[in-house]
Image (spheres, rainbow, N blue to C red):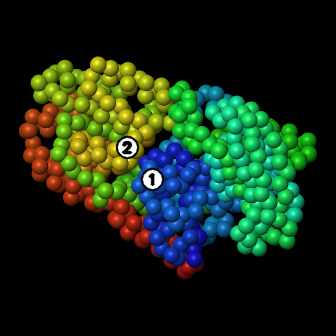
Amino acid sequence: MKRIAIYDRYLSTIGGGERYSCKIAEVLSKDKEYKIDLITDIFADLEEVSRRLNLDLSRVDLKVFPFISEDYAAKITKNYDIFINATYLSSLPAYSSRNLYLCYFPTPFDVDFKLAHRLLLFFFRRPAMWLFRLADRLIGDFDSIEIEEGIYEPKRFMLRRGSWSSGSVSLKVHDEGRELELGLKNPEASSLDSMDINIEVYAGTSGGKLPFYNKDLNLLRGVKRIIRIPLASRSDFSIVKVSSDTFIPSESNKRTRDSRNLGVVIYNESKINFFKKILLKILGYIPLFIVTFPENLKFLTTYHGIITISEYSKKWIKKWWNRESLILYPPVDTGNFKVKKKEKIILSVGRFFPEHHNKKQLEMVEVFKQLMRQYPEEMGGYTLYLAGGVSEKPEHLKYLERVIAAAGGYPVKVITNIEWAELVEIFARSYIFWHASGMGEDEEVHPEKFEHFGITTVEAMASGCIPVVINRGGQKEIIRNGYNGFLFENSQELKDKTMDIIKGRVDIEKIRKNAILSCRSFSDNKFGENLISIIDGILSVNNSG
């Protein structure tokens, strides 16, 4: 059985990139010759990920690693036959038999850096690297405790700081016959006045199905207790399970959007000497980007191939990185979209955020408002739907607020963090689809600000919407102007082509039929076929070597 790992440290965000990486996992997990691990460093519930992305990850295992430094990469990757790095802006070197690097677009690694970031990087990178390497050598817990599931931020746990759990924690501990000290806390931030907790310990290699240690306790809000937990003797390892009552912050506090299922806060209280304690304390305050930022592209030499998502991205990988790449168009679940009676809905789908390839929701609101003012009769009854996810980052929430404020007084619906089934339903009823990433930008100066492919455009085509999308980036590989949709150069063309559709100046049914037929080139089935071909190719190279 071949062991394959897919690394996505942003798994918990459940975005478009995560559907790509998880679809790789789903496709490969169907082959009994492959054992698939999804690797991340922030815990995510695979059942929730599967439900939100409409995937089957039941044959996929989640591995949560506390990413400490680049030196730690060998511990993560070396035991696999194939390692696929699907993490955006990752510079993690890889040490498995064969390694693939997934690049959506060769975005500069300092794309988000402000002056403060650059100063921190300049003055503190070398001492930070030295400290993290020293920690790797000194702290045995990086090897002795494996976090199998349930701790949201393993790095905090390893650095002796408290981390929220999901209410169901599993630790694999390799210290034979010793004790594990855990701190358990029901913090003031909890909405639970009283929290019930259970601790169970199972022997590893003995195959025992019953715990040899079982303890129940109850913690009032604000109380922390340190528990000494016995570990198995004459066994390679022990499995320590900690379960607790849980709560969802957003249900009890309307000021937060945190919808995670949170349980007991857990601390690693194992005894260490004063020097190690000080070292860990220092490490806890060092921003991870200082350690992970690549000074060059040397990390790419550890990979045997680069996978990218479009001709557009392939072009810029060659231009900026001077490397060839294989195109694996993103998977689109075209078979699960449906066409219903169309309503007067103009739809745009994309995350709300101000940087990178921003989806231009603000600009689309302005175009829609201009259409409403210039063509009040033709636009009567039309509504602009803006649907997409939004993270808890302050700048993302502020951008969302600007969009909502700009739409005030007009028929604009802003829907955030929408469920898959609801989104499919809106697609089915929508008449026109807009996509404007990069509108008003210079493609030669900032190519990263354009859509690198355009998954939502394909989803709109599968739903019988008429796409009106920008004539830039990966959109040109999907839409043939006047055949299966329309391409626009600027906001005036967006308005003109939208009005051509609304006024019936084009053959809508013919374009809709062509859109539905041509979207099959980007279906899940096509993605699976192409993926298997790539994996077979890299394995055959490995075998011949």
Q: Which residue, as the protein is rendered here, is positioned at the far bottom?
A: 544
- Can you give x and y, in whole percent of width and height, for residue 134 in the image? 82, 49
Residue nearest the observer in this picture, 58 or 392: 58
Which residue is depicted at the point 81% across and 41% down? 225
Residue 428: percent from the left, percent from the top?
A: 25, 47
Is residue 66 positioned above or below 415 on the image? below
The answer to whether residue 76 is left or right of residue 238 is left
**Neighbour class for label 1 at 10 Å: few (<14), some, many (≥20)?**
some
Corner quadrant of residue 112? top right
The residue drawn where x is 49% and y is 52% is: 49
Q: Position of residue 99 (x, y in %)?
A: 57, 64
Going by the numbered disc 2, the residue's amino acid type is Glu
> What amino acid type is highlighted by mark number 1?
Arg
Q: Which residue is mark 1?
A: 51
- Report if residue 486 is visible in the image: no
Task: Say the numbered circle drawn on residue 451.
Answer: 2
